[in-house]
Image (cartoon, grey):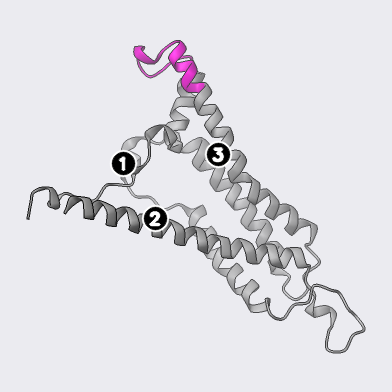
Amino acid sequence: MSAESDEAPPSYNSLFPDKMKPNQIGRNLRRGLSLGGSDESETGGKGCVHFIASLGCLLFIVGIALGIPITMIVIGASNLDDCPIERYIPIWLIVMGVFQMIETIFRTCFHGSRNDEDESQGSVDPVACFLCAWFIAGNVWVFRNWNEYTSVKMMNVTNITSSNYCDDLTMKFSFGIIISSYLLVGGIILCFCLCCCCFLKNDS
């Protein structure tokens, strides 16, 4: 076996340019706000360019990342009392949206303050752990009632009572969020497997 085949697969950090990482964006923003870079080669106009580019990337990422959480909060809050079949579904949307916003803002704006040594040491993110557990709870509440609910509040029709009712948008939006999350995770895993396969094939 050749010496090249003994090399380890590429790391996560090597697959993405440093300038697009949240921690690098945060560092560039701090350099711009301090009117210069970390050394003399990055002072003046170059630091200003880094600041403008990083600010543009930051606004773009935050605008996209916060769109879905804000929509979740709005739909959940506006239909808080319109899902008697499972009153936790609108609450699930609100809490999920709020904590996703917190997680997005933290990772985008404040992750850059961490040192490289801190990044190399594994740490548990309590917000991410809570989101994972809350997501599983939402799966139970939505899928358990998906085939039982009616989107029309019909009080005087046989076999249909007010307890069967849930706002159609609230239920379908929650269902769509869950399915989209599974598709996103599956797509990431598939892309990672394809990258590993291509790397091993080229290395052999």
Mark 1: which amino acid? Answer: Ser
Q: Which residue is mark 1?
A: 14
Q: Which residue is mark 3?
A: 61
**Mark 2 is on which residue type?**
Cys
Residue reaching furthest to the right: 156
Circles 3, 1 touching at the beta carbon (< 8 Å): no
Residue 25 location, x and y as percent? 46, 31
Is residue 69 shown in magenta?
A: no
Could one spot residue 34 in this view of the protein? no
Counting other residues with Cα less than 10 Å from the Cα at mark 3, is it few (<14), some (14-19), or many (20 or more)?
some
Secondary structure beneath label 2: helix
Please state the horizontal and vertical placement of residue 102, each as a whole percent of the image.
Answer: 58, 46
Q: Which residue is mark 2?
A: 191
Seen as rendered, the residue at the extreme bottom is: 158
User: Residue at image x 26%, y 47%?
Assistant: 10
Q: Position of residue 126 (x, y in %)?
A: 48, 54
- Residue at 34% across / 56% down in the picture? 194
Return the disc, 2 or 3, that comes first in the chain's sequence.
3
Instruction: Specify the segment rendered in magenta.
Output: 34-51
Label 1 element class? helix
Quadrant the N terminus occupies: bottom left
The 10 Å Cα crowd at callout 2, few under 14, some 14 to 19, many 20 or more, is: few
| Depth order, front residue of 95/55 | 55
Asked if residue 35 lies in the magenta stretch, the reply is: yes
Residue in the picture at 72% in, 81% down: 148
Secondary structure type for disc 3: helix
Tell me which label, 1 or 2, sits earlier in the chain. Answer: 1
Q: Residues within 10 Å of mark 1 (few under 14, many from 20)?
A: few
